[in-house]
Image: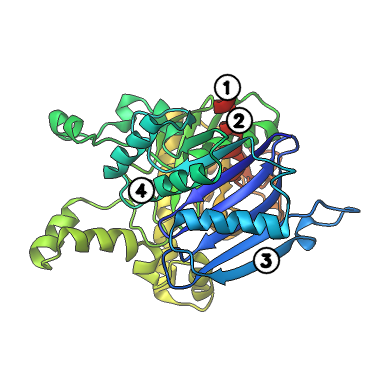
Amino acid sequence: MSVVLVVNSGSSSFKYQLIDMRTETVLASGLVERIGEPVGRSTHTVVAPPADGASPTLLDATYERELPIPDHTAGFGVMIDAFAENGPSLAENPPTAVGHRVVHGGARFFEPTVITPLVEINIDELSVLAPLHNPANLAGIVAAKKAFPDVPHVAVFDTAFHQTLPRAAYTYAIDAELAAAHRIRRYGFHGTSHKFVSEAAAAFVGRPLTELKQIVFHLGNGASVTAIDGGSSVETSMGLTPLEGLVMGTRSGDVDPAVLFQLARRANMTIDDLDDLLNKRSGLLGIAGSADFRDVSAAVERGDDDALLAFEVYVHRLRAYAGAYIAQLGGVDVISFTAGVGENAPVVRAAALETLGFAGIEIDPERNGARGRGIRRISTDDSQVVVLVVPTNEELEIARQTLVAVAG
């Protein structure tokens, strides 16, 4: 059996999925959280196969525990206990490899990579570019290798898909020597999602990936958009960090850098203050008072002016990037929406593309408003550009790339 355990580790939690790669089905998933707090929490879900056409989610069984979880190593012990007590048996479904999400691979890692001590050193060293993410990712790797010492572990980097960006796209127009010395350039993020969605979209429309010009909007609490030409990322909205680009739940996205100078001089804000402002107190939260798009939408329905402004700013940025990327690509064949907002907010999809009829984009209101779980077309049959909703599956993409790395 070809089974892959996928791990996404944060500083005080980690998520996991056990995936049977013969059928690409999830056997179990879980979350270990509140690591390091007096009382931690483990949630383990056993995914039952569908029977008689029933939805698998109706048959799933979820088990919860609360207990002290002092560190990630203890957390993996709790996870293994959950498998032993609730199934599926790891003895009967032994992982052939463990795939790890790692946020920042810098310019060093451009493909899934089997983790060696040198790779761990590099991930740690790249923490200077992702201080909130890479140390946590590495903690999960170290703990997982203790729990599963006899199988290969693979790092799949969020930035890797964007290593195909041309120099003109990833270069910032600042002093070249200073930029090189401190590795200042655009790296891009959400690469695992953009890769999965673009490949799924190509399969859905029945055309070779290499022939398609695509734009993928990954719209969640974090949001990014990528222009993909022939399967390669050629432009993306996030930059050195995930702060640049679109308006997000708590992140500002693009701002004039001089705003920071002004706030430092006039409001006496420190570097840490500014970091906190742009990453944690801006975006939808900063304008409307909530980072949850569902709350903002509900407030718009009630006639709240702040929420309406937040929505308009959010959509304005989407349109600006869509138009720019159509220009960069020289046209577009497929536009896809994914992630929480992208998959579940028809009003955002319609508004984002409302002014782009000149590019051959025509949304079907009925298709756009209809609920669905899988990939679906929301453009009209006559639309020159196919517009899709494509549910992302980063865990499956990590598992696929893990098998590629192990095999190669």
Query: Residue drawn 54% across and 35% down?
Result: 195
Q: Is residue 370 visible?
A: no
Tell whether label 4 touches label 3 (CB within 8 Å): no
Q: Earlier in the sequence, mark 4 or mark 2?
A: 4
- The three-letter amino acid code for the residue at tag 3 is Tyr
- Residue named by callout 3: 63
| Residue 403: mark in rendering | 2
Tag 3 secondary structure: strand
Q: Is residue 2 above or below residue 147?
A: above
Would you call the spot at circle 1 few (<14 residues within 10 Å), some (14-19), or many (20 or more)? few
User: Looking at the image, which is closer to me, 46 or 315?
Assistant: 46
Kindly report which numbered mark, 1 or 3, lies closer to the viewer in this rendering: 3
What residue would you read off at disc 4?
A: 135
The Cα–Cα distance between marks 2 and 1, rounded to whole angstroms, is 22 Å
Q: Are marks 2 and 1 in contact (CB under 8 Å)?
A: no
- Give the mark nearer the N terminus: 1 vs 3: 3
* Spatial separation of the CA atoms under disc 1 and disc 3: 44 Å
- For numbered disc 4, what is the local secondary structure? helix
Q: Amino acid at mark 4?
A: Pro
Residue 151 appears in the rendering: yes
Q: CA distance from mark 3 to mark 2?
A: 29 Å
Q: Where residue 384 sits in the image (x, y, percent)? A: 62, 34
| Residue placed most toward the observer, 332 or 222 | 222
Q: Which residue is mark 1?
A: 210
Residue drawn at point x = 45 percent, y = 40 percent:
158
Residue 298 percent location from the top left of the image? 53, 73
**Residue type indicated by callout 2:** Leu
Cα distance, mark 4 to mark 2?
24 Å
